């Protein structure tokens, strides 16, 4: 079989990818979560492996099979995702695609909450920011990439997020249309040197283009 010219460009590199949502339990049968199919993150893991990288995919609950040649670590909550990310280090690059729940219940119920007269008041506490934590860690990957799903002022929010979180790149996508669970993405790549706008592409094409850019940078 003939190999594409770019095959093997990431040989010897370890790349960490987070994907999917996190689920934060309310009680044993209920949770809060962000919307995320996991498709874009899984496509990125696949594209990186296709360039020869060793890929660790830390994934929240999704209805997808792990891509061939990728090591998947399945997690449920943000705190489990953070622990799995830490355990997978060191890495040459990290691509944080997961839609991490920003809050969890301070005190999840051990038994199923029964429907009563008053609706339960959910007291939320903030989850750890996995990307921001990794940016400050002594094991910070050389290339740290965050994602940002925005519904308005996409580039403005993404530029601010890059600095605030200490990421090298932010891959911003406009989710004001029908992107969630869909098969295409409109991307702005925000780096230290500026903002690139990509044409709307199928998710596998976004993944391949990003993987090539990562190979260029490493
Ligand atoms: N992220 C993370 N841990 C969190 C929240 C977010 O690692 N607790 C990562 C995401 O995987 C993504 C990036 O940070 O790569 C941006 O996530 P986003 O939700 O857009 O950023 P927030 O800082 O949570 O801002 P917002 O208020 O817009 O949700
Ligand atoms: Ca968030």
Image: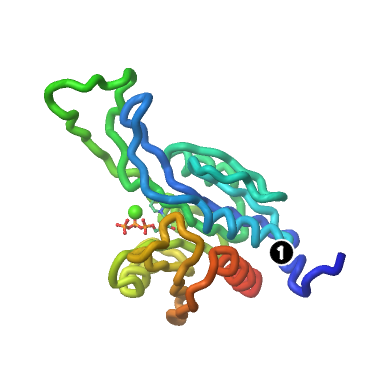
Observer-nearest of 47 and 182: 182
User: In terms of secondary structure, where does tag 1 sit?
Assistant: loop
Q: Residue 178, percent across and down? A: 39, 62
Residue 3: name its quadrant.
bottom right
Pick the front one: 137 or 185? 185
Residue 71 in percent (x, y) is at 66, 45
Write down the residue under mark 1: 51
At 78% from the left and 71% from the top, the residue drawn is: 4
Along the line of sight, the residue nearer the viewer: 40 or 216: 40
Q: Is residue 173 left or right of residue 116?
A: right
- At 49% from the left and 77% from the top, the residue drawn is 198
Q: How is the image coloured?
A: rainbow
Q: Is the N terminus in the top left, top right, bottom left or bottom right quadrant?
A: bottom right
User: Looking at the image, which is closer to me, 137 or 12?
Assistant: 12
Q: Is residue 218 visible?
A: no
In the image, is 102 to the left or to the right of 210?
left
Q: How many marks?
A: 1
Is residue 124 positioned above or below 13 on the image?
A: above
Find residue 217 and report its horizontal and vertical position in percent: 61, 73
Task: Say whether mark 1 is within 8 Å of ligand 1.
Answer: no
Q: What residue sits 49% from the left and 43% below the top? A: 60
Question: Which quadrant, please, contains the C terminus?
Answer: bottom right
Ligand 2 falls in which quarter? bottom left
* Residue drawn at (26%, 22%) of the image: 113
Label 1 neighbour load within 10 Å: few <14, some 14-19, many 20+: many
Which residue in the rendered view is the most extreme toward the right?
1
In the image: residue 16, left or right of residue 103: right
* Residue 54: x %, y % from top left: 69, 54
Q: Is residue 39 at least partly visible in the picture?
A: yes
């Amino acid at each position: 079989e003939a190999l594409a010219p770019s095959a093997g460009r990431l040989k010897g590199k370890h790349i960490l990818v987070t994907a999917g949502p996190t689920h934060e339990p309310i009680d044993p049968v209920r949770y809060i979560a962000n919307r995320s199919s996991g498709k874009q993150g899984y496509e990125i893991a696949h594209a990186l492996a296709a360039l020869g990288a060793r890929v660790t995919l830390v994934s929240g609950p999704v209805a997808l099979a792990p891509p061939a040649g990728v090591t998947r670590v399945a997690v449920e909550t943000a705190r489990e995702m953070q622990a799995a990310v830490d355990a997978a280090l060191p890495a040459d690059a990290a691509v944080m695609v997961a839609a991490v729940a920003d809050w969890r219940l301070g005190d999840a119920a051990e038994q199923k909450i029964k429907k009563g007269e008053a609706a339960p008041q959910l007291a939320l506490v903030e989850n750890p920011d996995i990307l921001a934590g990794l940016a400050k860690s002594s094991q910070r990957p050389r290339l740290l990439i965050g994602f940002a799903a925005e519904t308005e002022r996409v580039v403005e929010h993404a530029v601010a997020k890059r600095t605030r979180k200490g990421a090298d790149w932010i891959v911003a996508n406009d989710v004001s249309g029908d992107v969630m669970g869909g098969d295409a993405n409109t991307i702005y790549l925000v780096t230290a040197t500026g903002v690139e706008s990509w044409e709307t592409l199928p998710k596998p094409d976004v993944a391949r283009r990003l993987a090539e850019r990562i190979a260029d940078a490493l």
